[in-house]
């Protein structure tokens, strides 16, 4: 074979073994990307479950907040009002996390919908007095709260929960 003879197409890119090695490396890289995505998904799910479990424990320890008499809380001490607001914030955070992590599982949304209803008078008043409050949550959570307020006919200025 002389130097002037044209080389085959594959010789320009390397031997067959080198091409196979490159293909295996590429497949390995793709597999690692899939694993990273799976780990991320599993971690998000575990984190969401932990947040919701924390909320459930908090609700168990504070039944006066999980099924509130909002008029009594408003008439109570400033400390109790702050505790209640923190309780609702934790609840909304837990729901935001679980709904995002388990978007394909309707039961998480149903659970949050059920637990949200008694807090609607507070959220209505809070949104009327401090509209920036809801902005501390994601757009989907804001829409969920506003839709729930509308569905339950809880509107400002009275913000009362109807007997629906």
Image (tube, helix red, strand yellow):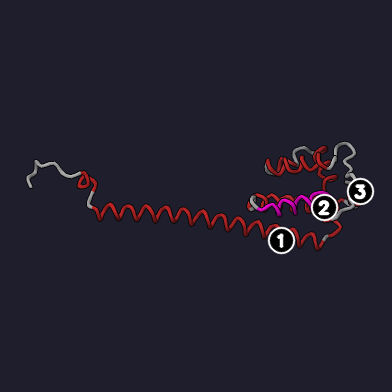
- Residue for point 24% across, 53% down: 16
Q: CA distance from mark 3 to mark 1?
A: 28 Å
In the depicted structure, whether residue 12 falls above or below residue 46: above
Q: Main secondary structure of the magenta part?
A: helix
User: Which numbered disc, 2 or 3, marks the residue that appears first in the sequence?
Assistant: 3
Residue labelled with disc 1: 53
**Foreground residue, 3 or 9?**
9
Q: Nearer the viewer, mark 3 or mark 1?
A: 1
Report helix, strand or loop for mark 3.
Answer: helix
Q: Which residues are magenta?
A: 105-117
Residue labelled with disc 3: 71
How far across and how far down the image is residue 91, in percent? 75, 53
- Is residue 93 covered in magenta? no
- Label number found at residue 84: 2
Q: CA distance from mark 2 to mark 1?
A: 18 Å
In the image, 18: left or right of 1? right
Q: Quadrant of residue 149?
A: top right
């Amino acid at each position: 074979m002389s130097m002037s003879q044209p080389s085959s197409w594959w010789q320009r890119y390397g031997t067959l073994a080198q091409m196979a090695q490159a293909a295996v490396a590429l497949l390995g890289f793709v597999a690692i990307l899939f694993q990273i995505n799976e780990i991320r998904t599993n971690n998000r799910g575990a984190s969401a479950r932990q947040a919701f479990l924390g909320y459930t424990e908090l609700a168990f320890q504070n039944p006066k907040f999980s099924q509130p008499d909002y008029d009594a809380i408003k008439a109570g001490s400033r400390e109790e009002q702050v505790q209640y607001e923190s309780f609702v914030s934790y609840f909304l955070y837990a729901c935001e996390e679980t709904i995002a992590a388990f978007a394909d599982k309707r039961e998480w949304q149903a659970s949050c919908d059920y637990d949200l209803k008694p807090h609607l008078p507070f959220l209505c008043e809070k949104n009327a007095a401090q509209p920036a409050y809801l902005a501390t949550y994601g757009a989907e959570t804001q829409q969920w709260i506003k839709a729930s307020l509308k569905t339950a006919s809880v509107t400002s200025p009275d913000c009362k929960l109807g007997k629906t």
